[in-house]
Amino acid sequence: MANLMAVTTHDTELLSLFRDPETKEKAFTDIIKKYQERLYWHIRRMVIDHEDANDVLQNVFIRVWNGLENFREDAQLYTWLYRIATNECLTFLEQQKKRAAISLSEMESGLSNKIKADKHFDAQKLEWKLQLAIQQLPEKQRIVFSLRYYDEMPYEEMSRVLETSEGALKASYHHAVKKIEEYILNH
Amino acid sequence: MQNRKDISNELLEISQLIAEIDAPKNPFEVPSGYFESLPDRIMEKLKTTYTGSVKNELEVLSPVISQIEKNNISHNIPENYFESFPEKLLSRIKADEATSASEELSILSPLLSQADKKNPFSTPSGYFNELSDNLVEGVKAIEFVKDELEQLSPLMGGLSKKNVYTVPGEYFDTLAENILQRIKHSQEKAKVISFRKNKPWLKYAIAAALTGVILTIGFFTFNNNKQNKTTEDPIAALSKVSDQEINNYLDNHDIPLNEIPNNNTPVLDFNENDITDLLADVSDNELEQYQYDNDQTGAKDLITN
């Protein structure tokens, strides 16, 4: 908890430094360094491909640069960043779908194919099956599962990130876990 | 009991209409087994939320998944990706905000912006200086040739480059459309007859083959018919064969009587009526003549009509 407080204070500090033109760039760089990995993996789990993840990550931080000044500190910076990252992911996937003019189900199998194309892919290993199982979920459920399972995000936090009620998120996560388990047991 | 009575009376005082409604108070239905399973369902929900830890939650929800090692194994990232990311992003943002091309370049690539923008390609020395003079000389040469041509051959010089050929009035107006139609037509044609197009001789081959088949069938059919006719009317055929020929045949060919299977020989069961019928159209004279010709001893028995 203390750690969380320190983090929060640090964020506030970063925000004020960002608002000062003299220190804007330095603060921005610090923010990136602080959150890039977490955000990167969150994005990468959705888009699979590194290059795509890199594109989305850059878009996220450009939005941060443009919008941070107006950021109202009633929410955690972390929450705000995750929200932007999630929206950018969904936008990206939507664009890909439109560009390829394919259905959503084909999109999902496309991401599964990207997983299978990984040079280390091993269909027999549980951890790879998990990746494929995750792709079977609808987008929103994938995000919920990813945030809870990998980032261990509290439901309260998640409800602010995804602007969905906690109850709905819990139900979504439980459902996702069951579906993933079913997939793993049957493959 | 008393309480209920009081409440009923109270209701009656407020509204007689409602007090007198004779219907079950709760019209709603509940799924079967709902209440029986409710405690268990609530306990399960409590378990997953009460523990407060994501790990425990997962253990309860799915022991299978909680066993899986949580690695981001699927994803290899370039070396120093995260180390260099902030710097790269910042320079991209600055470049977007640059107000001039040179400023943009200095942000994106200090190296390039420092590089001399000298052109590495070389031109022949004095190229540009002499260029205008060369051009003028060239134009003069062209004019000279033209003049010469006019002088040497007034006739040719006088020939205008007018097109002597004539073209139907609306030719060019309708040309494009005509070409398109021809293309479409040939494509359709090609679709239909592309097979024949490649092998023009094929249609003749097919025709010849079909003709051959028809003729062959016809031949056999005809022959069969002929044979049928022969078998249908052996008596008529035999009557054409002279007696002499028959005698010759019988003399030359020994018909082995013992081969005739007597058992199987159909026995004609003649009676007097049958013979009468059979010989009904034979006149007595003919019968007598027959008897005389053949001198058969059994002729006495011959029944005359």
Image (tube, coloured by chain):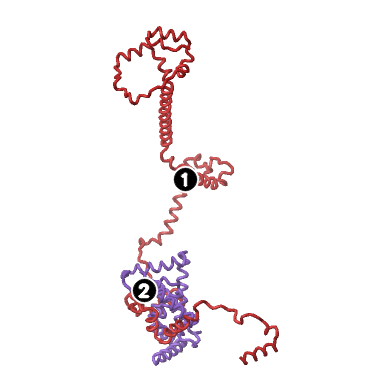
Chain colours: A purple, B red
Q: Residue at x 52, y 41 (%)?
A: B159
Q: Residue at x 46, y 8 (%)?
A: B285
Q: Which residue is mark 1?
A: B191
Do we see residue B94 in this rendering? no
Camera-nearest residue between A40 and A151: A151
Depicted A124 relative to depicted A7: above or below? above
Tag 2: Cα neighbours inside 10 Å, few (<14), some, or many (≥20)? some
User: In the rendered view, does A129 fall on the left or right side of A61?
Assistant: left
- C-alpha distance separating marks 1 and 2: 52 Å
Q: Quadrant of residue B82?
A: bottom left
Which chain is disc 2 placed on? A
Camera-nearest residue between A148 and A10: A148
Type of the residue with mark 1:
Lys
The image's mark for residue A84 is: none
Q: Residue at x 36, y 77 (%)?
A: B65
Do discs 1 and 2 share a chain?
no
The image's mark for residue A130 is: 2
Q: Position of residue B102 (x, y in %)?
A: 43, 74
Q: Position of residue B52 (x, y in %)?
A: 41, 87
